[in-house]
């Protein structure tokens, strides 16, 4: 047991009371990603990089380089968010589970079609990982030029709706412009700085998490043919199992184990990706519900477009997961059936082996009985021969003994005596064997 001196000092909380060491971190989490106060005209650029494999070090190195170029210190090693002023705007960095976001907002250029300049994502910026999402959101006041601005989007996929109780209109075509950015236009109709910042962030999150959710679709498409192959091979194995003439159960079991190993390897590799896609899809659905979308006649809504395009992809991922789970259970049940069949075959082989051993034991017993009979005759012959020699010796000594008669009279008692001795010896051995078994 540690001494009291080795115990860490308790954290002092309100009213001087000891508090949990994680209390400050938990309370601060709800304020870690606040909505920015935003007024039009404003432009927001956000880049999202996958950083789970490279690790957080690449983010910190890129952020430290940007900070040093401005004569500022970089974030701490365990920081999850950081911000600094840049080019008339402000750059915010946030670390998430498997990606990081770099958001720069600044006054918007005069026209919606103008290129944004002064941002930090130029030649001096080092990408901390693979780019997965790039968004440009323009927050502009609603005026007579709205129809002209909307013409910049692809009419085939244009989504335009009223949001936040009609205080804003939001448009996007979910396509990339010449710079590879997904364009989002928010028309302010009296939102106010807080609500404008909240709506802008939620729309950006819809696009970011939509992209991340779709990462599961290529994985599902990659695994689909392999799952189909395993299903076909398992069907062939089960069909062969139904054939009573088939006796190579161990080979079939080995094939089943190999199929199960392939399936579990794919399931393990896709477990995180499918789980993350489900979580991201739930976030997209939640954000769509929060923005209070209202349709505008003649235009498709954000929610309708995403349900039609994102929904099938997510159902494909869930279908592949379900197929993996169901197929794993079927392989396990089939393997159990094969093991049972192999056990029955082994029991049958053991039964046949025992029967063969019983037959050999009976033959050995009969042979032993035959040998015992012959041994009684042989021993009796030698004993009678000895008696004959004894009778002849007595006759030569002058005693009134006829060797032939004496030999003949000795045969019955000698045979009976030898038979009784052999039988007694056999019973003694049988009793000893019985005692050893018990």
Image (cartoon, rainbow, N blue to C red):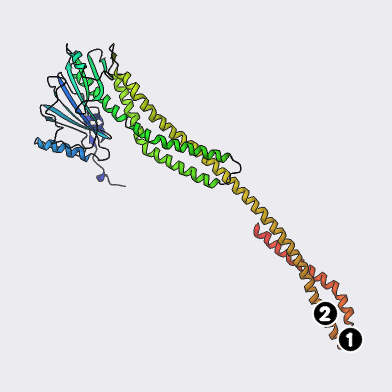
Looking at the image, is 390 positioned above or below residue 308?
below
SS label for mark 1:
loop
- Badge 1 crowding class, 10 Å Cα cut-off, few under 14, some 14 to 19, many 20 or more, is few
Looking at the image, is 353 positioned above or below residue 296?
below
Q: Nearer the viewer, residue 218 or 280?
A: 218
Residue 25 showing in the rendered view: yes
Residue 195 showing in the rendered view: no
Q: Give the quadrant of residue 102.
A: top left
Q: Give the quadrant of residue 28.
A: top left
- Badge 2 crowding class, 10 Å Cα cut-off, few under 14, some 14 to 19, many 20 or more, is some
Q: How many marks?
A: 2
User: Which residue is most to the left?
Assistant: 71
SS label for mark 2:
helix
Give the residue pinned by disc 2. 387
Q: Which residue appears at 40% of the width and 29% of the height?
A: 318
User: Which residue is most to the bottom?
Assistant: 397
Q: Nearer the viewer, residue 424 or 239?
A: 239
Q: Residue 166's spot in the image, x, y percent?
A: 24, 12
User: Cα distance, mark 2 to mark 1?
Assistant: 15 Å
* Cβ atoms at labels 2 and 1 below 8 Å apart: no
Instruction: Name the image quarter holding the C terminus.
Output: bottom right
Q: Residue 277's spot in the image, x, y percent?
A: 33, 30
Q: Give the quadrant of residue 198.
A: top left
Q: Which mark is residue 261?
A: none
Q: Which residue appears at 78% of the width and 70% of the height?
A: 376
Q: Residue 223's spot in the image, x, y percent?
A: 39, 36
Q: Which residue appears at 25% of the width and 27% of the height?
A: 30
Looking at the image, is 160 positioned above or below residue 93?
above
Q: Earlier in the sequence, mark 2 or mark 1?
A: 2
Q: Residue 119's spot in the image, x, y percent?
A: 13, 29
Give the residue pinned by disc 1. 399
Please give left or right for residue 191 compared with residue 388 in the image. Answer: left
């Amino acid at each position: 047991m540690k001494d009291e001196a080795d115990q860490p000092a308790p954290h002092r909380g309100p009213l001087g009371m000891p508090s949990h060491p994680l209390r400050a971190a938990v309370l601060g989490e709800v304020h870690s990603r606040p909505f920015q106060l935003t007024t039009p005209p404003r432009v927001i650029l956000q880049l999202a990089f996958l950083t789970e494999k490279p690790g957080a070090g690449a983010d910190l190195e890129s952020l430290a380089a940007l900070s040093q170029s401005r004569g500022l210190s970089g974030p701490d090693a365990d920081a999850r968010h950081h911000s600094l002023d840049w080019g008339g705007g402000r750059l915010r960095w946030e670390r998430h589970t498997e990606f990081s976001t770099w958001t720069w907002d600044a006054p918007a250029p005069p026209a919606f079609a103008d290129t944004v300049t002064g941002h930090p994502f130029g030649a001096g910026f080092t990408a901390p990982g693979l780019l997965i999402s790039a968004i440009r959101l323009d927050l502009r006041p609603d005026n007579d030029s709205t129809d002209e601005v909307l013409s910049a989007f692809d009419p085939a996929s244009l989504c335009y709706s009223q949001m936040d109780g009609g205080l804003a209109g939001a448009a996007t075509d979910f396509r990339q412009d010449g710079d590879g950015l997904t364009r989002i236009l928010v028309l302010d109709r009296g939102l106010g700085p807080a609500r404008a910042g909240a709506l802008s962030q939620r729309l950006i999150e819809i696009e970011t998490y939509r992209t991340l959710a779709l990462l599961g679709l290529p994985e599902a498409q990659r695994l689909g043919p392999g799952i189909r192959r395993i299903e076909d091979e398992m069907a062939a194995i089960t069909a062969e199992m139904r054939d009573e003439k088939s006796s190579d159960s161990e080979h079939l079991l080995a094939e089943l184990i190999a199929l199960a190993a392939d399936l579990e390897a794919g399931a393990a590799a896709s477990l995180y990706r499918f789980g993350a896609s489900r979580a991201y899809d739930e976030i997209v659905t939640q954000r769509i519900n929060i923005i209070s979308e209202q349709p505008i006649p003649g235009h498709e809504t954000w929610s309708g477009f995403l349900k039609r395009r994102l929904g099938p992809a997510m159902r494909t991922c869930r279908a592949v997961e379900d197929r993996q789970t169901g197929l794993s259970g079927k392989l396990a049940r089939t393997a159990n059936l094969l093991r049972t069949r192999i056990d029955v075959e082994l029991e049958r082989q053991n039964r046949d082996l025992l029967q063969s051993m019983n037959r050999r034991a009976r033959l050995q017993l009969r042979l032993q009985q035959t040998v015992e009979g012959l041994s009684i005759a042989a021993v009796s012959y030698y004993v009678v021969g000895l008696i004959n020699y004894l009778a002849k010796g007595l006759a030569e000594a002058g005693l009134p003994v006829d060797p032939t008669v004496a030999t003949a009279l000795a045969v019955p008692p000698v045979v009976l005596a030898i038979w009784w001795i052999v039988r007694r010896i056999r019973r003694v051995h049988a009793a000893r064997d019985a005692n050893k078994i018990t």
